[in-house]
Amino acid sequence: MAKLIESYVSVPLTERGRGILIAGEAKTNSIIYCNGRSVIIRSLDNPLETFVYGEHSYPATVARFSPNGEWIASGDTSGTVRVWGRHGDHSLKLDCKALTGRIDDLEWSSDGQRIVVCGDSKGKSLVRAFMWDSGTNVGDFDGHSRRVLSCSFKPTRPFRIATCGEDFLVNFYEGPPFRFKTSHREHSNFVNCVRFSPDGSKFISVGSDRKGVLFDGKTGEKIGELSKDGGHTGSIYAASWSPDSKQVLTVSADKSAKIWEINETGNGTIKKTLTFGSQGGAEDMLVGCLWLNDYLITISLGGMMSLFSASNPDKPPKLISGHIKSINAIAFSLHNGQSEIYSSSYDGIIVRWILGSGYAGRVERKDSSQIKCLATVEGELIACGFDNKVRRIPLLSEQQINAEPIDVGAQIKDLDVSVGCPDLAFVSTDAGVIIIRGSKMVSTTDVGYAVTAAAVSPDGAEAVIGGQDGKLHVYSIKGDTLVEESVLERHRGPINSVRYSPDGSMFASGDLNREAVVWDRVTREIKVKNMLYHTARINCLAWSPDSTRVATGSLDNCILVYEVGKPASARITIKGAHLGGVHGLAFSDQSTVISVGEDVCVRVWKLP
């Protein structure tokens, strides 16, 4: 039985021009946020301590801990709210259709009995409050005419609810059962966030008009504003109160975060502007924040989570990041005595991870083209993109690209490198294959059939090319010329992946018809038969360093590990490895396999 030993999870999914919600639990210093269909719980004290919940049928948008920390309420783009257990088997308490459209915000009442949600809805209320265990309505919420972006529950009795949205309004409701009390039009643009202070005495609204307005928590009347002196110069997307209700943290499109002192009259003055060592691009705009105990957390559009200390805000922040979009390729390297993982996502980001410690930075690139394939060889990371270019990236501490990209002039299908000949890269395109030595293309071969995958042997003397027709073509490499030696016909679907074993004695292939095959390189005979246990197409495969195991990853969310010399039925199965499919595999040693997938996670598995 394989055991999950590490999981490097995604950062929150961000959207330009919109604030995002990140919630926390003070007792455990844990945060919760969403990306795709995943709801992610993460410890701030130990960022590798994570849990991913993937039971939503639609992309999840918001999640919050219950006041006692035992339950999670999460909403998605379909308007569904799920209430599920945080611990144990994560049992489902409630599954209800709260709105007819996307849920943008959600909050519990302080007694844990009620939940309020808001968002988009067609022809019905844009806000709804209900009992947490039955879904029974506890009020009517009139007063908004457009999408409601944020809602907040007064944490002390008498209970109140405040909402705000795209109609520039801040509405106030009394209850339960809740009824409309008053409405304010203090903002001249979208009101992005509304939050009650922990003591319930006041609440704040912030908007795209760069304003922050404060209201009395019991009556809903306006009592003050954030000072314009030293204030934000861009849209304010989020606000979060300090635990003592005396300060507020705000973040803005102007790429700054500010701490405000809130006086007794309800006005706010600047106490501190947090500084970031950023380059100033659009991805540095700040779209989310949270004040949790001594942590001041800000989130940028590019997914960088900065953790400042509230007691010492001048101290440089701890940075946590990762991928925002689905991961499509992975490479492993032992570099300078460190086990390093490189992963790339569909937005062109390459992230470097250190096995055992997690996020170690992004690989800086001169462009942002989407990456198709990754490989590592002798201190270099080789990447090829959908821009038809191959790049050799030195694995230096500063992570800078020195060499110019090689334009192969066609859409790249696969990339492989020869361990024994580190300057040799083998690139396949739709129509043929290209041999690259160092930084130069030395040959282009039109093979006369549709190429779907290719691999080069560790000694650089042989190559295997898989076709759309399901055939494997074996070539000898003489100089820079390919000479076809044989054609292997076993697969019943297009070849999707092919790789040589590290010792060069075998190669493995996988197809879209869910079958994998291990071949003897010399005799061309099948070494492991009937590797037909996936229920969907095979996306990737990888060999263990000692050439005794081969792992396959599939669209069926599973990883299968076969042992050469044993029947395929003796396989190790890792079910549910990645929600949405496994996209990449690599071994770090004989008993450790690393996987990436549609769920934006990098996972490390220990095999028996």
Image (tube, rainbow, N blue to C red):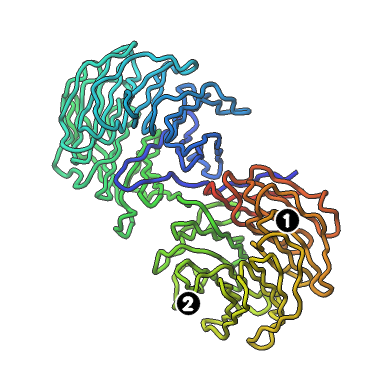
| Amino acid at the residue labelled 2 | Gly
Q: From the viewer's perspective, is 424 left or right of 12? A: right
Q: From the viewer's perspective, is 17 left or right of 132? A: left
Q: Tell me what residue is drawn at x 41 percent, y 21 percent.
A: 115
Of residues 151 and 312, the one drawn nearer to the viewer in this rendering: 151
The residue singled out by tag 1 in the image is: 515
Q: Is residue 397 above or below residue 22?
A: below
Residue 438 placement (x, y as % from top left)? 55, 82
Secondary structure of the residue carrying numbered label 1:
loop
Of residues 518 and 193, the one drawn nearer to the viewer in this rendering: 518
Q: Which mark is residue 409?
A: 2
Q: Is residue 83 above or below residue 407?
A: above
Q: Residues within 10 Å of mark 2 (few under 14, many from 20)?
A: few
Q: Is residue 488 above or below residue 586?
A: below
Q: Would you say residue 322 is visible in this rendering?
A: no
The outermost residue toward the bottom is 479
Q: Tell me what residue is drawn at x 26 percent, y 42 percent.
A: 258
